[in-house]
């Protein structure tokens, strides 16, 4: 069974740092690009960052560029999001998800983790 | 950046109703669009990919159509378990962008 399990969220003060993890199982992890997507309380979905299966290319939303770093360990089947200089508006549930794009086509595989809550207080 | 708009933002419907949700892209995205359903407190789940392909395990009352800049999600006969929020997502280019969502609730 394909599973994604996030961890690492919590309560942090403005300007602090957190590292989120997403443990993947049930599929060939290094074959898939991965995303982080967040959802502020009562709000819609917002894409945060993507990373290729090899880890060789990364992408960021303007709202987190220069503060967040996405990475992965294919040997550990784990995706990471290092979040620095956190702001109140970074407060959200952070989900990892399998990227829809797969080798130039759309992957039929879809899975999201349940998410981990990050709360940034001033 | 590609902007995604959705309409309506919310709708009230009854069990058995036919429901249509529209998503529009600010520029052409071919068919690089998925539709997602999210229930309160749960992670989103994809219903449709490539604009019109039904995700494995999703009931056939869900269908999608469109290409380029205009897309629709149709629920042919609304069921109690379909009351949820629906989002479109374009993955044609970075940044990936979601529509703002359509909340479907009970009339």
Image (tube, coloured by chain):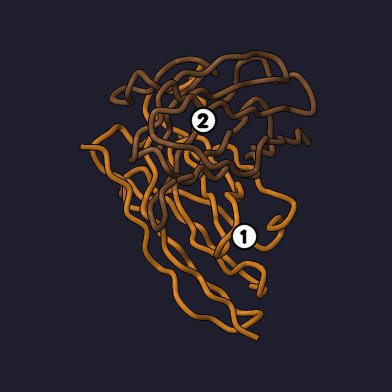
Chain colours: A orange, B brown
Q: Return the x and y of residue B66 as percentages of the image width and height.
A: 62, 14
Q: Position of B74 compared to B83: left or right?
A: right
Q: Return the x and y of residue B27 as percentages of the image width and height.
A: 79, 23
Placement of A8 over or under B1, stated as above or below? below
Residue in the image at 52% along x and 28% along y: B19
Q: Which type of secondary structure does the marked residue at label 1 adopt? A: strand
Task: Give residue A64's quadrant in the image.
Answer: bottom right
Residue in the image at 38% along x and 23% along y: B55
The C terminus of chain A sits in image quarter: bottom right
Placement of B65 over or under A42, stated as above or below? above
Q: Which mark is residue A68?
A: 1
Q: Position of B15 compared to A18: left or right?
A: left
The N terminus of chain A sits in image quarter: top left
Task: Give residue B5's quadrant in the image.
Answer: top right
Q: Which residue is mark 2?
A: B35
Task: Give residue A26's quadrant in the image.
Answer: top left
Mark-to-mark CA distance, 1 and 2? 27 Å
Task: Tell me whether marks 1 and 2 sit on the same chain.
Answer: no
Other residues around mark 2 within 10 Å, as few (<14) / some (14–19) / many (≥20): many
Q: Nearer the viewer, residue B36 or B93?
A: B36
Residue projecting furthest to the left: A1
Q: Do the residues under discs 1 and 2 have CB atoms within 8 angstroms?
A: no
């Amino acid at each position: 069974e394909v599973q994604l399990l996030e961890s690492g969220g919590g309560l942090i003060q403005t300007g602090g740092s957190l590292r989120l993890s997403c443990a993947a199982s049930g599929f060939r992890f290094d074959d898939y690009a991965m995303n982080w997507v967040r959802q502020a309380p009562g709000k819609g979905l917002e894409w945060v960052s993507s990373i290729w299966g090899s880890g060789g290319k990364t992408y960021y939303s303007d709202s987190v560029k220069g503060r967040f770093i996405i990475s992965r360990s294919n040997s550990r089947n784990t995706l990471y999001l290092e979040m620095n200089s956190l702001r109140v508006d970074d407060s959200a549930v952070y989900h990892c998800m399998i990227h829809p794009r797969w080798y130039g086509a759309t992957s039929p595989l879809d899975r999201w983790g349940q998410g981990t809550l990050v709360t940034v207080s001033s | 950046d590609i902007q995604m708009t959705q309409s309506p933002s919310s709708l009230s419907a009854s069990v058995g109703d036919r429901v249509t949700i529209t998503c529009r892209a600010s520029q052409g995205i071919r068919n690089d669009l998925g539709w997602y359903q999210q229930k309160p407190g749960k992670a989103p789940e994809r219903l449709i990919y490539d604009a019109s392909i039904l995700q494995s395990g999703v009931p056939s009352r869900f269908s999608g159509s469109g290409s380029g800049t205009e897309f629709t999600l149709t629920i042919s006969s609304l069921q109690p378990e379909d009351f949820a929020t629906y989002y479109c997502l374009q993955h044609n280019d970075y940044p990936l962008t979601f529509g703002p969502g359509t909340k479907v609730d009970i009339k």
